[in-house]
Amino acid sequence: MEKIALITDTTADLTDELVEKYNIKVLSFRIIYKDREYRDKIEISSQEVYDGFKKEVPTSSMPALQDMEDVYDQLEKDGYTHVIGITLSLGLSGIYNGLTLVSKNHPNIKSHICDSKSISLGEGALVAECAKLIEKGKSFDQIVSEIPNIQKRIHLFFVVGTLEYLIKGGRIGKVTGTIGTLLKLKPIISLDYDGKYYTYAKVRGRNQSLSKLVEIAKEISDKKSCIAYAMHGDAEEDTLKVKEVIGKLPNIKSIQYGGCISPVSGVHSGPGLVGLVLVEEE
């Protein structure tokens, strides 16, 4: 009898309720200041990160390999036979490589480590869909074979208050960088097939960028009905306004408010992020 565990990381922005319901193991990234270090979401909150930007912008690192080993050790003790690991995009972090390495140290558990090629609730939606398949009694092989199809149905878009933090953190990818800042561009950012940021649409000004998110939601949902998620990075008011408008679109079956993104994501995106995830229904 298969006993399948799910492993992910804090950037997936899963709710505590979902983590508890499906017993998902969540690995914490690290937030690193000059004289101290915190475990993402456990020892520091997103708001504390944003509030501290004036004094210091921290760096980050992936979860410790020992944390991954500890999770696997516990899963073996608990009798799990299989693991599906879904990580932050390899284009943004080395966690996929780390978890793959650790999984090979545990041959008694058959593992499939998946690069989500996404972040936040783009990654989280993939975890949630896999959790539902486990609940339905699907086999490990059935779920693994379905993952690419799920990924094709997930679309993530976001706009940031300033490109400054993406530039500082080296996460700018194919997004218009310093020139975009000078031109006051507010690009709609998404992730490409390599899981790296790119400019999905060029927009000038905050209001236009938020309107563009709504337009994108309409374009995608006109073709296929969707469930949606809205999340923010120190921009709750703007996000709730966008959520309200998108929720009224005819083919948006539901829209959930995901709250604030993880502290580690906030380090790299800075304040002012409004994010949108669309999951096409089958």
Image (tube, grey):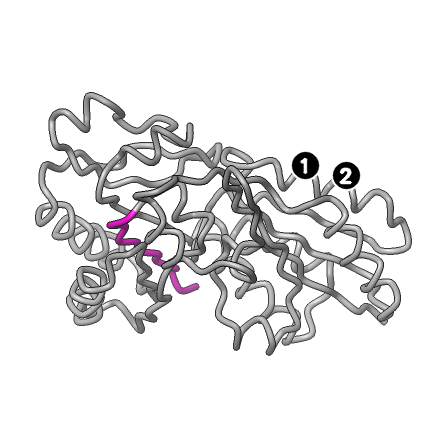
Q: Amino acid at mark 2?
A: Leu
At x 30%, y 58%, the residue is 232
Q: Which numbered tag is attached to residue 235? A: none
Q: Amino acid at mark 1?
A: Asn
Q: Quadrant of the N terminus?
A: bottom right
At x 21%, y 50%, the residue is 216
Give the magenta-colored segment's residue range: 271-282
Q: Which numbered tag is attached to residue 97? A: 1
Q: Position of residue 55 (x, y in %)?
A: 35, 42
Residue 263 among magenta residues: no
On screen, residue 206 above or below 19: above
Whether residues under marks 1 and 2 lie with C-beta atoms below 8 angstroms apart, the answer is yes
Spatial distance from mark 1 to mark 2, Cα to Cα?
6 Å
The quadrant holding residue 54 is: top left
Q: Residues within 10 Å of mark 1 (few under 14, many from 20)?
A: some
The quadrant holding residue 202 is: top left
Q: Is residue 128 left or right of residue 254?
A: right
At x 61%, y 52%, the residue is 86
Q: Secondary structure at mark 2?
A: helix
Which residue is under mark 2?
101
Q: Secondary structure at mark 1?
A: helix
Can residue 125 be seen by looking at this rendering? no
Q: Quadrant of the C terminus?
A: bottom left
Q: Is residue 203 left or right of residue 225?
A: left
The quadrant holding residue 241 is: bottom left
Q: Count the marks: how many?
A: 2
Q: Position of residue 263 (x, y in %)?
A: 44, 53
At x 51%, y 60%, the residue is 41
By secondary structure, the bulk of the magenta-drawn segment is best described as strand
Q: Is residue 202 left or right of residue 6?
A: left
Q: Position of residue 90 (x, y in %)?
A: 56, 36
